């Protein structure tokens, strides 16, 4: 048995064992596509042919097979992916679950909406949707069904926090979050009207502190009507180039800034998907539903490779693929390097492990990166190293 076939067999067993999806033909095709993506590193249909065992003789035959899968309306993304994603989170019920909501634009024509789980310095896709829309800003009605789906899927998790950037700061979204009993940290634009900070409504930019200062406000009203009440942290950290204004339902503190900063893990996910690991933008597909199914292949490869990387770390084999003295690569890249070594060097194919709720070893590409992290860290143990010269606290009145 070739190493490529060995990887395919484990992928097929991975899809069949945990998925409720029953069409074996679709799962076999999907397993070969994931195998081709892991080996080639490209979400390009023409790049997978060398890594697929088939009776087909022409390259076009392979591409037609992949296109039939991507255009097949009977292929349900959620039925295939969600059981595997939820299984990977089975050890997280006693941990706070951080969800990141964000968008990315493809070819200035399609907008992909993501809900991802923050995990060990990266983000793992949970739900996604592709719209034919040339802007990263989308209306609440476009992602409300995704929020309802996520709330139902994660109903057994008692502690969930939603993280989002300024493009999602709107009345409908905040109202939904307050009714859902989820916690949240959301950045607001500088022109957001605030009630209770002064005697009259004022824009958030008017209370921005100086560099190195932070201010906490309790019971702030948002927008023109002031009906949404929450807490606010405004800060200008030394380590960033612009002010932050973050609203939360929890007590405002420096921890609020740390939790909001976890949202940037989704930027690494987009980088891995679009140009870093899988070259999504090299795809020639220009159909929203087909792109959703294409991203299913990327999401499964991300999830499978990340869990493989964690298995490598737990087995004490990281140094075989990571040249750093301490972990300097993400679990995704560790997993991809290990799997490509399975194909090319005959390494042992490990059993994937569930996602780790806590990172046993943080990743730093260099000693300088570690030192910068220590200086800028906003974790509770590092409060003494934060270069805020002043921190204010206020309580606003209705």
Image: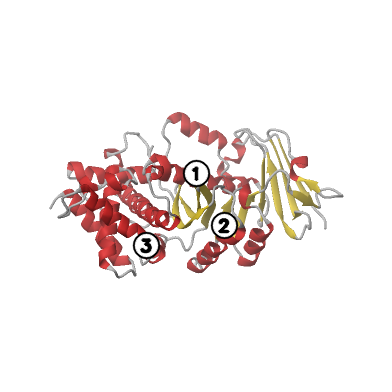
Q: Is residue 163 left or right of residue 231?
A: left
Label 1, on which residue? 267
Q: Earlier in the sequence, mark 1 or mark 2?
A: 2
Question: Does residue 290 show up?
Answer: yes
Residue 188 in percent (x, y) is at: 67, 48
Q: Earlier in the sequence, mark 1 or mark 3?
A: 3
Label 2, on which residue? 161
Residue 119 in percent (x, y) is at: 45, 51
Q: Is residue 205 left or right of residue 341?
A: right
| SS for callout 3 | helix
**Residue drawn at (44%, 48%), measured in percent from left and top?**
120
**Crowding at mark 3 (Cα within 10 Å: few <14, some 14-19, many 20+):** many
| SS for callout 2 | strand
Closer to the camera in the image, 380 or 117: 117
Marks 2 and 3: CB-CB under 8 Å? Answer: no
Closer to the camera in the image, 311 or 206: 206
Q: Earlier in the sequence, mark 2 or mark 3?
A: 3
Give the alpha-carbon distance from disc 1 to disc 3, as whole Å. 23 Å
Residue 40 in percent (x, y) is at: 28, 43
Give the alpha-carbon distance from disc 1 to disc 2, as whole Å. 18 Å
Among the 4 quarters of the image, the one containing residue 272:
top left
Q: Is residue 50 above or below residue 83?
A: above
Tell me the quadrant of the picture where the C terminus can be found: bottom right
Label 3, on which residue? 84
Give the alpha-carbon distance from disc 2 to disc 3, as whole Å. 22 Å
**Residue drawn at (30%, 48%), measured in percent from left and top?**
45
- Look at discs 2 and 3 and give the one toward the viewer: 3
Q: Is residue 157 above or below residue 191?
A: below
**Crowding at mark 2 (Cα within 10 Å: few <14, some 14-19, many 20+):** some
């Amino acid at each position: 048995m070739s190493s490529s076939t060995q990887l395919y067999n484990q992928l097929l067993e991975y899809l069949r064992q945990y998925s409720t999806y029953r069409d074996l033909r679709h799962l076999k095709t999907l397993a070969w596509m994931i195998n081709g993506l892991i080996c080639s590193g490209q979400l390009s249909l023409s790049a997978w042919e060398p890594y697929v065992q088939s009776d087909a003789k022409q390259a076009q035959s392979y591409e037609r097979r992949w296109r039939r899968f991507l255009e097949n309306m009977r292929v349900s993304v959620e039925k295939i992916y969600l059981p595997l994603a939820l299984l990977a989170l089975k050890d997280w019920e006693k941990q706070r679950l951080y969800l990141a909501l964000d968008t990315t634009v493809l070819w200035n024509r399609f907008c992909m909406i993501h809900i991802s789980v923050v995990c060990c310095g990266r983000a793992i896709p949970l739900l996604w949707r592709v719209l034919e829309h040339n802007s990263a800003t989308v209306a609440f009605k476009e992602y409300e069904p995704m929020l309802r789906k996520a709330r139902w899927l994660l109903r057994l998790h008692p502690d969930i926090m939603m993280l989002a950037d300024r493009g999602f700061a709107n009345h409908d979204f905040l109202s939904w979050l307050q009714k859902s009993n989820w916690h949240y940290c959301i950045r607001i634009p500088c022109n957001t009207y605030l009630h209770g900070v002064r005697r009259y409504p004022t824009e958030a930019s008017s209370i921005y502190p100086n560099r190195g200062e932070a201010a906490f406000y309790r019971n702030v009203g948002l927008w023109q009507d002031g009906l949404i009440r929450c807490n606010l942290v405004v800060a200008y950290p030394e380590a960033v180039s612009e002010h932050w204004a973050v609203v939360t339902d929890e007590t405002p503190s420096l921890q609020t800034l740390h939790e909001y900063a976890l949202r940037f893990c989704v930027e690494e996910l987009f980088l891995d998907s679009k140009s870093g690991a899988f070259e999504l933008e090299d795809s020639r597909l220009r159909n929203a539903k087909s792109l959703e199914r294409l991203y299913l292949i990327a999401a499964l490869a991300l999830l499978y490779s990340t869990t493989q990387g964690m298995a490598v770390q737990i087995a004490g084999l990281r140094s075989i693929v990571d040249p750093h003295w301490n972990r300097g690569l993400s679990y995704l890249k560790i997993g991809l390097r290990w799997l490509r070594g399975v194909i090319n060097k005959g390494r042992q194919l490990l059993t994937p492990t569930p996602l780790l709720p806590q990172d046993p070893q943080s990743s730093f590409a260099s000693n300088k990166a570690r030192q910068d992290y220590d200086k800028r860290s906003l974790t509770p143990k590092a409060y003494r190293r934060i270069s805020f010269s002043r921190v204010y606290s206020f309580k606003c009145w209705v």
